[in-house]
Image (tube, helix red, strand yellow):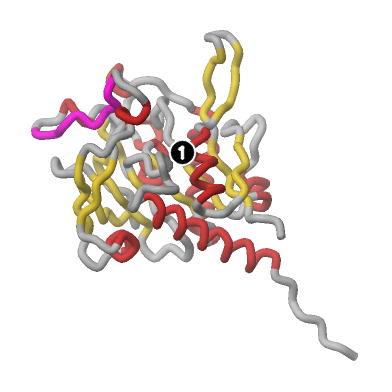
Amino acid sequence: MTRPVVGIISNSFLLNETYPAHGGGTMNFEAVSGVSDCLGMLIAADPRFSCVDELLEICDGFLLTGGRPNVHPEEYGEAETSAHGAFDRARDAITLPLVRACVERGQPFLGICRGFQEVNVAMGGSLYPEIRDLPGRMNHRMPPNGTLEEKFALRHRVRLVEGGAFHKLFGAPEVMTNTLHGQGIKRPGERIVVEGWAPDGTPEAIRVRDAKGFTMAVQWHPEWDAVNDPVSRPLFTAFGKAVHDWAARKHAQPLKCSA
């Protein structure tokens, strides 16, 4: 039986600093395949190549990945500054309407890091350009040195809303996570429910209120070691179940009455 398809949102970059390319981290595919039991398909996040309506029909769910470029502040009504860093306007043009369409349709998505921020902006929220510059906040960015294991190591706790969706999913009021981001939620969007916070008050886990489908997003990177991590595995398992359920409903054929 064919596995459901998860569209994995790509990031644009220059290969060898000259060749334009779209790519996605292998660990995203490992989590989608090994834990969610779905077929990962890389999506070129550029309206020249991808149409949201087509993506909604081809894919059963979406993984909104992390990425170095940030959501452009014009998307939440603010002016661009040097603190906002690099941008990917083509990805903005795909992911923001895609999030809104998925919420409307009940089609599942899981947001990670930049994807977490995209969900907030798509629902009308705003972002801080640099969390570490705010009084009392810690540096959430990826360590500049070290091995991949050291960069993705667990670094802080996330406190969860008691009885909330994330608490029920993880079975604990607090979880340990990695942290590799510069920006963060300033103003939660309409219908955005914040259910997890870092020790410094930075939002880390959100969902969309009254959504018909799976709309979870986290600021950390659960795709890292998702097969073994006690927090990542239930998250990708639940996402996979939602994608399988969507695919089953989409492909179900009505019974024909016999003569």
In this image, 1 relative to 16: left or right? right
Image coordinates of residue 138 in percent, x first then y, are 16, 32
Q: Residue at x 31, y 39 (%)?
A: 126
In the image: residue 100, left or right of residue 183: right
As rendered, which of 215 and 146 lies closer to the eye? 146
Against 101, residue 81 (above or below) is above
Examine the rendered structure and indicate whether residue 50 appears above or below residue 161.
above
- Observer-nearest residue: 225 or 202? 225
Residue 192 at x, y percent in the picture: 33, 54
**Furthest residue toward left:** 136
Residue 87 x, y percent position in the rendering? 43, 24
Residue 102, can we see it? yes
Residue at 27% x, 46% y is 204
- According to the picture, the residue beneath numbered tag 1 turns out to be 65
Residue at the right extreme?
A: 259
Quarter of the image where the N terminus is located: bottom right
SS of the residue at dot 1? loop
Camera-side residue of 31 and 104: 31
> Which quadrant of the figure has residue 166?
bottom left
In this picture, residue 218 sits left or right of residue 161: right
**Image location of residue 55, percent across then percent down:** 63, 46
Q: Main secondary structure of the magenta part?
A: loop
Residue at (33% x, 52% y) in the render? 231
- Boundaries of the magenta span: 136-144
How many marks do you count on the picture?
A: 1
- Is residue 118 in view? no
